[in-house]
Image: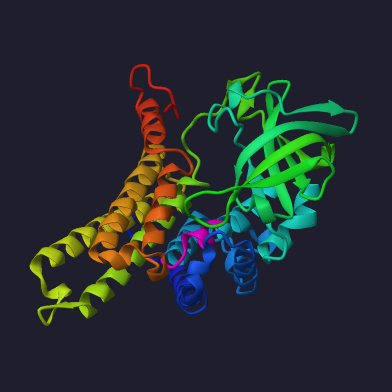
Amino acid sequence: MSRILTEDQLAIRDKVRTFARETLGPRRLEGYGNPPFLKEMNRLLGDAGILRVFAPKSLGGDEMGVMGMVIVMEELSRECPGVALSAMMQMNIPVNMVSTPAVAERWARSALAGETTVSFASTNPAGYANYSEHPDLARREGDEYVLNGVRHFAGQGTFADVMGVSGLVNGDMHLFWLTTDQPGLTITAMPKMGVGAPWGRVEMSDVRVPAERVRDMSVLVKDRQLTDVTGASKVSTHPISAMALGLAEGVWEKTDAFLRERTFNHESLASMQALQHKMVRMKQNIEAGRSMLYDATQLVQAGQGDPVLDHLLKPFLTEMAFDVATTCMTLHGGRGYQTSEGIEIYLRDAAGLLIGECTTDMHYSTVASLLDMPGALPGSP
């Protein structure tokens, strides 16, 4: 394995990098708390074919696998992790729809075109990873399921057209596909620090879903017991790690440019050895993170994925990005703390990545379980 990319991977990297710099970069600060902008970017990414990178050929996709998504996430996150997060959902959720044919036929292709905005909601107010402890979300009535309950932290939830909601039915996990204009469904904003638009709080009161739009997910939770805790999922750990890598690269590059321009005693700040060493150390960690991420992802592409490495990625990359963003903000001095300069948003976004798709300790607990350490419980805080 290596960090050397194929010609196709280099081509998509260059395409997304150009989009990020020319289309997204000049407007990147609009990506915070701004649903119309995010919808616009989704449409432009769809028009450019970028959202199809991960999708199978059966959906008109490029089928470039997890490495393709990693490249897209990294390049978009250099300028705006909020747009990258929206793109990740637009790329990933349609692929999830494939297992529910009636849903895929109706919405998957339009989502990949950026025309239908999609969301996913799985977090009960009682918690995210403790699925087996959640109350039942739905009951079956004939050819329909009736949903009553609440879900938090739905990305794109406040402006989505279609939403996947997971929950238990008689103790077994199911996935329900809803349209956001359905009777009994109320979605309100949950403001947060950064990374795109507010989450959606999803409240369901007798929301009816046809059985053809429901997928049995008891492979994950059966009779209120976790049944598939392998630590092998790459659907979120690799892309969010790529977001952290891109974020660190983006804020480092902007800081490098600032230090070269800013002077003290008629000398650029970049000429000062103490600051040079800070920049070099950050660059060292960024490149170490890239090697780790690319290696792990290419192992997955080759069918040789390592679950331990996959779960070490996210803590390493996200904590590295937070450290880089913090240092870069302080190197900008007062300007770095000023919202209009566009540096402090990297720190707010980096803080969100520390939490998204499970915290560091949850990943370390999963690794401890995979290593068969005594008493280790996967995903425990």
Give the percent coordinates (x, y) of residue 252: 29, 65
At 68% across and 31% down in the image, what residue appears?
167
Identify the main secondary structure in magenta.
helix
Q: Is residue 257 above or below residue 153?
A: below
Give the percent coordinates (x, y) of residue 301: 46, 53
Give the percent coordinates (x, y) of residue 372: 36, 23
User: Which quadrant of the rendered structure holds the N terminus?
Assistant: bottom left
Q: Which quadrant of the structure image shows residue 216?
A: top right
- The range drawn in magenta is 78-85
- Work out whether residue 100 can be spotted: no
Q: Which quadrant of the structure image shows residue 117?
A: bottom right
The figure's colour scheme reads rainbow
- Work out whether residue 328 can be spotted: yes
Q: Is residue 142 above or below residue 88?
A: above
Asked if residue 73 lies in the magenta stretch, the reply is no
Give the percent coordinates (x, y) of residue 25: 46, 74
Asked if residue 79 lies in the magenta stretch, the reply is yes
At 41% across and 66% down in the image, what residue appears?
78
Q: Nearer the viewer, residue 96 or 90?
A: 90
Q: Which residue is at the far bottom?
A: 266
Q: Nearer the viewer, residue 306 or 329?
A: 329
Q: Is residue 158 left or right of residue 15?
A: right
Q: Is residue 264 left or right of residue 257?
A: left
User: Which quadrant of the rendered structure holds the C terminus?
Assistant: top left
Please give the count of numbered marks on the rendered protein.
Answer: 0
Q: Nearer the viewer, residue 159 or 93?
A: 159
At 57% across and 68% down in the image, what residue appears?
50
